[in-house]
Image (cartoon, rainbow, N blue to C red):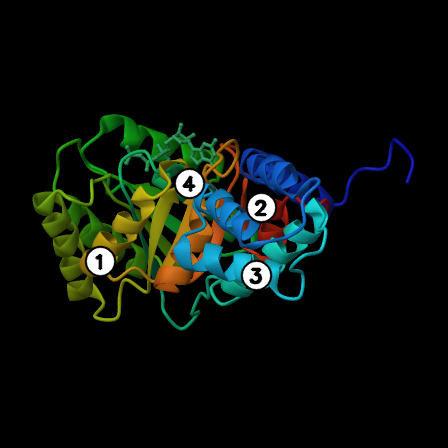
Amino acid sequence: MNDTTPETPKLSWWRRLSDGLKRTSSSLGTAVADLVTKRKLDRAMLDDIEDVLLRADLGTSVAVRIADAVGTGRYDKAISADEVKDVVATEVEKVLAAVAKPLEIDAGKKPFVILVVGVNGSGKTTTIGKLSQKFATEGRKVMLAAGDTFRAAAIEQLKVWGERTRTPVISGAQGSDSASLAFNALTAAKEQAVDLLLIDTAGRLQNKAELMNELEKVVRVIRKVDATAPHAVLLVLDATVGQNALSQVEAFHRTAGVTGLVMTKLDGTARGGILVALAEKFKLPVHFIGVGEGVDDLAPFTARDFARAIAGIES
Ligand SMILES: Nc1nc2c(ncn2[C@@H]2O[C@H](COP(=O)(O)OP(=O)(O)OP(=O)(O)O)[C@@H](O)[C@H]2O)c(=O)[nH]1
């Protein structure tokens, strides 16, 4: 390859993922390297490795399992940081492989309705914009519903994404009822033979009962138009919140029957390991990850790439 050869998409995506997770992987890698130098492996070292993994938000059971795997057959021997990283990548990949699933669109549902939920600022609207671009590129007829009627800025933001991706946006006035907006959008989408309807919702904290009830109402009202909808409920999680993501998944799953996860803001956080803890605990499919604000900064989630990026293994 010479200097003018463009990178293949795969490589440039890998680079963005590993750069994005650099803060997670380098704090983990540095800590592991510090631990293993000039020492033979013993129980105390494994306890220290477990602590490093816990600090990287991987969760207790995964941390214990990785430490056990590192220890197997290696007691009283010198061990390198690279060996530990390999074990981390292998064990993390096993956990993630069970949840890395593409978002399947059933073409028999017209429209296929995707409800997008999450707390304030997690990246719902941005993710909808990125998804609308992806689906439109695949040749699907997409419609967006600006169901975040609380914030005028959210409605405007979705309209901007609509223009950018040449996708119609159904919106109402700020403060209007989001359930009736969802109803109108689904009715319009049916009339216009749209393939995919993406519905934005207002950000809400998982512990605010009133707002969570409103989300239940959105789901109920959608079902009046199509009893099988929504066909996917995507929970958008901000990786930077770390452990709080666990209670978000619990609450949104209970309220809206989450079918899959999207994790955003994996660029520049040291807390990317939380995705592993979520996978271990909830076993919900992870469809996409976001590593930036641009339209191309969303990619299907792949277990091997993510596991190697977290462990700090080069490509
Ligand atoms: N760095 C980074 N920023 C992101 C990513 N995804 C979204 N953002 C940014 O996060 C901020 C919040 O994103 P929004 O899409 O407005 O979030 P929201 O969930 O719709 O927010 P509410 O309307 O308040 O509920 C924006 O500044 C986005 O550009 C990502 O993957 N990486």
First along the sequence among labels 1 and 2 = 1
Q: Give how far apart the Cα atoms at labels 2 and 3 are.
A: 11 Å
Q: Amino acid at mark 3?
A: Glu
Residue annotated with mark 2: 310
Q: Give how far apart the Cα atoms at labels 1 and 2 are.
A: 30 Å
Residue annotated with mark 1: 256
Residue annotated with mark 3: 91
Report the residue at 57% width, 36% height from top. Answer: 20
Give how far across and how far down residue 93 sits, in percent: 57, 60
Residue annotated with mark 4: 239
Give how far across and how far down residue 223 sits, in percent: 18, 65
Q: Amino acid at mark 4?
A: Ala
First along the sequence among labels 2 and 3 = 3
Q: Residues within 10 Å of mark 3 (few under 14, many from 20)?
A: some
- Ligand 1: which quarter? top left
Q: Give how far apart the Cα atoms at labels 3 and 4 are.
A: 20 Å
**Residue lying at the far left of the rendered structure:** 210
